[in-house]
Image (tube, rainbow, N blue to C red):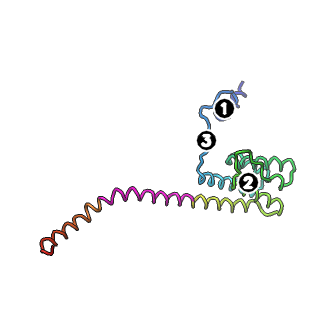
Amino acid sequence: MLLAVAVLAAAGPSTVRSRAGSPRAQPPSPRRADPGADALTLAADLEVFALCLNAGMSVSGAAAATARHAPPQLAGALRRGSDLLALGAEPGIAWSEPHVRAGGAADPMTSAVLRLARRSGSSGVALAAGLGELAVQYRSEAADRATAAAERAGVLIAGPLGLCFLPAFVCLGIVPVVAGLAGDVLRSGLL
């Protein structure tokens, strides 16, 4: 009895609910469709993969550890590669592109990671260094997308502000000057 209480107390609430068969309190939140966020998530996952490799983990172990929190397409590719490597498959086969299901498109970021892993497996190039460079590239692309979105927002904001301030500028700035000049011209007798 004490052992059962200890096991249930040591586990987190979601683990206890799943073991007890009760439904989860909240459904899992859907992934955002923001490509910048996905690029940042992927960059963080690639850095975790590289850190695991630098710490001395095997490639299959590092891939399995990274797959737990990776975006869905990358997680599937990492799990597949990890399982095949653990079974003794050649790196070129383990990191080959999985067949894309009907209606789905191959993720270019996942394809780049798989290409890098295949190249590393065939030529012996350090995978951790390549993953770090790829993470830096994805972070840079995400920063560029964020900058472009901010610049677009600035341009879109300028239109309504111009429509609001232009009439006020004309009424308070130009009309009094023109009226003053017209009054001076009319009083001088030129017209």
Which SS class for mark 1? helix
Q: Quadrant of the C terminus?
A: bottom left
Residue 143 pos. (x, y %): 57, 60
The amino acid marked with disc number 2 is Cys
Q: Is residue 58 visible?
A: no
Tell whether label 2 touches label 1 (CB within 8 Å). Answer: no
The amino acid marked with disc number 1 is Ala
Instruction: Pick whichever, 35 or 159, lies toward us.
Output: 159
Q: Which residue is mark 2?
A: 52
Q: In the image, what residue occupies the spot 80% across and 58% down?
A: 118
Q: In the image, what residue occupies the spot 74% across and 59% down?
A: 128
Label 2 and label 3: CA atoms lie apart by 27 Å
Q: Is residue 25 above or below residue 57?
A: above
Instruction: Pick whichever, 13 or 91, lies toward us.
Output: 91
Label 3 and label 1: CA atoms lie apart by 29 Å
- Residue situated furthest top in the rendering: 1
The amino acid marked with disc number 3 is Pro
Q: Which residue is mark 1?
A: 9
Tell whether label 1 touches label 3 (CB within 8 Å). Answer: no
Q: Residues within 10 Å of mark 2 (few under 14, many from 20)?
A: some
Please name the predominant secondary structure of the magenta segment in the image. Answer: helix
Quarter of the view holding residue 31:
top right
Earlier-in-chain disc, 2 versus 3: 3
Tell whether label 3 touches label 2 (CB within 8 Å). Answer: no
Residue 14 pos. (x, y %): 65, 34
Question: Residue 30 — which label?
Answer: 3
Instruction: Pick whichever, 77 or 2, lies toward us.
Output: 77
